[in-house]
Image (tube, helix red, strand yellow):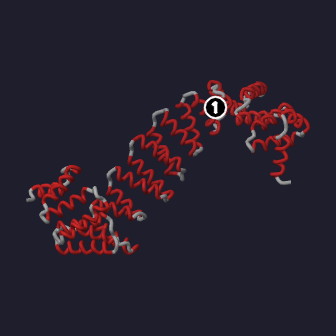
């Protein structure tokens, strides 16, 4: 007969009967059959049922194992706690100094919030044992009692003998919340993670502590460790976010140059820093890879920004050629239209054409003050002073006079006759 079928049969025998019938059945079944039934109930989490069987077995046989099993089932069921404590105490008087009783009484007392009794039992347990399991168990009593230093001291001994992650996390929680030892907690976590492969729970706790300490460098190094361990792109994103929070563009660039997995972000950082020659190299690389005409437009922009002499006619002709090629191939983003149109206007390559292109950009973003500034400058170049003034006045009212180019345009247009 299969185990599942045995389980089903026993569940029918014990789980579906009435209370009276259940008691009657227990009278007829052998000790071995009762043990199997109790174990089965334990496996399925039916602790109330296993409690009744172990209780009967202990009453019938007086064997200590059944008393301990009875108390364990009561603890798991969170029921019959007071009765289990009473029965254990009676047995303890007859068989003093049994460590198994201490191990059961502590959690039973804590379950019904009798913390003083739990700590008394913990003291007895510590007199009898230095086993890490017992130190761990005793620490719970002192933690409930608010004796955080004592609980932490016991957990430190447990961790020293068996450096398990879950023990460390409990220690760290106490140090963070109750004993004002956050920096020491960070040190413990950092030492542990450097010596072990750890779960995300350790990293998350580290991040929480570093955030509380407002330690951006600690957060950054933690995300780097997480990225090295899991190679998850979300951690890479967080790394860049922290670099930006620190305003450390150079650090972000150095990291991405070594990592080589997000050259798209690296490209934007090169532009933000003004390293246009490196950005140009990447734009060429991207275009070779995907043949997207946007990179042609980007190359035109970068070529102009990278030039030392912004009035170099040969350079301007190349910029115009790149932008015109990109637009002819279907690139119609208003950003590139504005850049192209403004270049034609400002460098007086073809002002009227530049005005028309800016007007196309404004169809996409009619309220964009940068585009309105470009159009005003175009009107100024062809001496349509009234139109230029109305547009530029609007730009100044919205943007103020913070940017050098706006100041230059505003001063010139106000003098326009």
In the rendered view, would you say 258 is above or below 398?
below
In the rendered view, would you say 222 is above or below 268?
above
Front position in the image: 366 or 306:
366
Tell me the residue at 29%/75% (across/down): 325
Quarter placement of the N terminus: bottom right
In the rendered view, would you say 111 is above or below 412?
above
Residue 272 placement (x, y as % from top left): 30, 59
Tell me the residue at 63%/35% (across/down): 137
Q: Is label 1 in a helix, a strand or a loop?
A: helix
In the rendered view, would you say 77 is above or below 93?
below
Residue 90 placement (x, y as % from top left): 77, 25
Left or right of residue 262, residue 40 in this image:
right
The residue singled out by tag 1 in the image is: 126
Front position in the image: 6 or 224:
6
Residue 323 visible somewhere in the drawing: yes
Front position in the image: 50 or 376:
376
Tell me the residue at 41%/54% (across/down): 239
Quarter placement of the C terminus: bottom left
Residue 203 placement (x, y as % from top left): 49, 48
């Amino acid at each position: 007969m299969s185990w599942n079928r045995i389980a089903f049969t026993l569940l029918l025998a014990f789980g579906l009967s009435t209370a009276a019938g259940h008691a009657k059945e227990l009278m007829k079944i052998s000790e071995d059959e009762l043990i199997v039934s109790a174990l089965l109930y334990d496996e399925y989490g039916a602790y109330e049922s296993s409690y009744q069987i172990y209780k009967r077995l202990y009453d019938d046989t007086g064997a200590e194992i059944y008393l301990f099993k009875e108390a364990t089932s009561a603890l798991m069921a969170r029921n019959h706690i007071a009765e289990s404590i009473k029965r254990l105490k009676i047995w303890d008087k007859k068989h003093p100094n049994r460590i198994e009783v201490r191990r059961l009484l502590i959690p039973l007392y804590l379950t019904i919030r009798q913390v003083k009794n739990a700590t008394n039992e913990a003291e007895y347990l510590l007199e009898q044992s230095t086993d890490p399991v017992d130190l761990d168990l005793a620490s719970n009593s002192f933690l409930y009692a608010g004796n955080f230093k004592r609980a932490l001291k016991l957990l430190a001994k447990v961790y020293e003998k068996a450096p398990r992650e879950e023990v460390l996390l409990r220690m760290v929680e106490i140090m963070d919340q109750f004993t004002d030892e956050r920096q020491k907690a960070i040190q413990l976590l950092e030492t542990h993670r450097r010596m072990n492969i750890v779960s995300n729970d350790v990293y998350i706790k580290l991040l929480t502590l570093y955030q509380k300490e407002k330690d951006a460098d600690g957060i950054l190094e933690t995300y780097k460790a997480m990225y090295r361990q899991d190679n998850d792109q979300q951690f890479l994103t967080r790394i860049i976010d922290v670099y930006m929070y620190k305003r450390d563009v150079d650090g972000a660039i150095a990291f991405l140059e070594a990592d080589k997995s997000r050259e798209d972000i690296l490209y934007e950082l090169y532009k933000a820093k003004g390293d246009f020659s490196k950005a140009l190299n990447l734009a060429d690389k991207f275009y070779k890879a995907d043949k997207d005409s946007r990179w042609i437009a980007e190359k035109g922009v970068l070529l102009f920004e990278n030039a030392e002499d912004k009035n170099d006619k040969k350079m301007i002709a190349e910029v115009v050629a790149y932008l015109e090629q990109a637009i002819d191939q279907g690139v119609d983003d208003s950003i590139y239209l504005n850049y192209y149109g403004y270049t034609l206007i400002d460098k007086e390559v073809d002002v009227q054409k530049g005005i028309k292109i800016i007007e196309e950009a404004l169809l996409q973003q009619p309220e964009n003050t940068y585009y309105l500034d470009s159009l005003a400058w175009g009107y100024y170049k062809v001496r349509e002073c009234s139109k230029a003034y109305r547009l530029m006045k609007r730009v100044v009212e919205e943007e103020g006079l913070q940017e050098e180019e706006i100041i230059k345009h505003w001063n010139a247009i106000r003098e326009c006759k």
